[in-house]
Amino acid sequence: MLRDVLRKPYVKQGLVLASLLPFAWLFSSAFLDQLGPNPAEYLIRSTGEWTLRFLCITLLMTPLRVTLKMPEWLLFRRSLGLLTFFYALLHAVCYSLFDMGLAWDDIVVDIIKRPFIAVGFAAAVLLSLLAATSFNLAIKKMGVVRWRMLHRCVYAIAALAMLHFFWMRSGKRNFTEVAVYGAILSVLLGWRIWHAVHTRRLKLQA
């Protein structure tokens, strides 16, 4: 029953529309001046946190597919990955526009001098590569093997994103959310390591 529901086109369409609600809320709140005394900081922080949330949800699709033996969950992985990129792009735009005033020379200096900006920039570059190659034509041009190798960079992106988040919160010594996201990503990435080892053992025993 659930498999049939997941295959329905309107389920994916509804997922995308629901995933855009945070953007709609942030946009309308900014337009109505309802983001508090520091709207720029609120927008930068919120878009960064939504990026992490969608990254976690995207990484959850493969464990759901394997543990529930339902390949239908992979129908949502590409859309969720692109939504992760969308919120990461918003995060970068808010930083560049509101924090740096689109002063590109200053942005370059900021990337070089501030480690947490540098790792965030590195994660954004890698995420851009994955988004640009997430379509069937890219898979055909690159070949499945090279495409899969490139998209394993999602693990590096997760690590860089968490390091970026940790360093950002360390200035205010606020690590509660860092611990929550870190625990979630650790479980998801740890499961992948366990699954890879388990799969290899089964192949050797076969």
Image: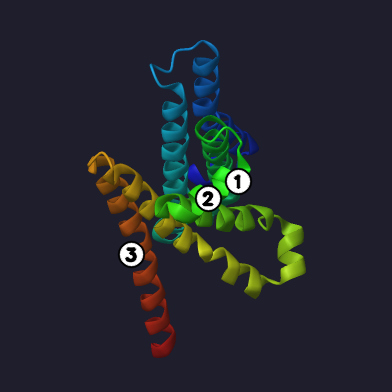
Crowd around label 1: few <14 · some 14–19 · many ≥20 (10 Å): few
Position in image of residue 151 (x %, y %):
57, 64
| Cα–Cα span, label 3 and label 2 | 36 Å
Position in image of residue 87 (x %, y %):
53, 39
Of tags 3 and 1, the one toward the viewer is: 1
Q: Is residue 157 above or below residue 150?
A: above
| Cα–Cα span, label 3 and label 1 | 39 Å
The one nearer the camera, 52 or 170, is: 170
Sequence-wise first label, 3 or 1: 1
Which quadrant holds residue 132?
bottom right
Looking at the image, residue 38 sits to the left or right of residue 87; the answer is left
Name the residue at 43% across, 57% down.
Answer: 160
Position in image of residue 191 (x %, y %):
35, 64
Residue 73 seen in this snapshot:
no
Disc assigned to residue 105: 1
Circles 3 and 1: CB distance less than 8 Å? no
Disc assigned to residue 109: 2
Circles 2 and 1: CB distance less than 8 Å? yes
Disc assigned to residue 93: none
Name the kind of residue labelled 1 in the image.
Answer: Asp
Of tags 3 and 2, the one toward the viewer is: 2
Q: Secondary structure at mark 3?
A: helix
Q: Secondary structure at mark 2?
A: helix
| Cα–Cα span, label 2 and label 1 | 6 Å
Name the residue at 75% across, 66% down.
Answer: 140
The one nearer the camera, 109 or 4, is: 109
Name the kind of residue labelled 2 in the image.
Answer: Val
Crowd around label 3: few <14 · some 14–19 · many ≥20 (10 Å): few
Q: Is residue 79 above or below residue 130?
A: above
Identify residue for label 3: 190
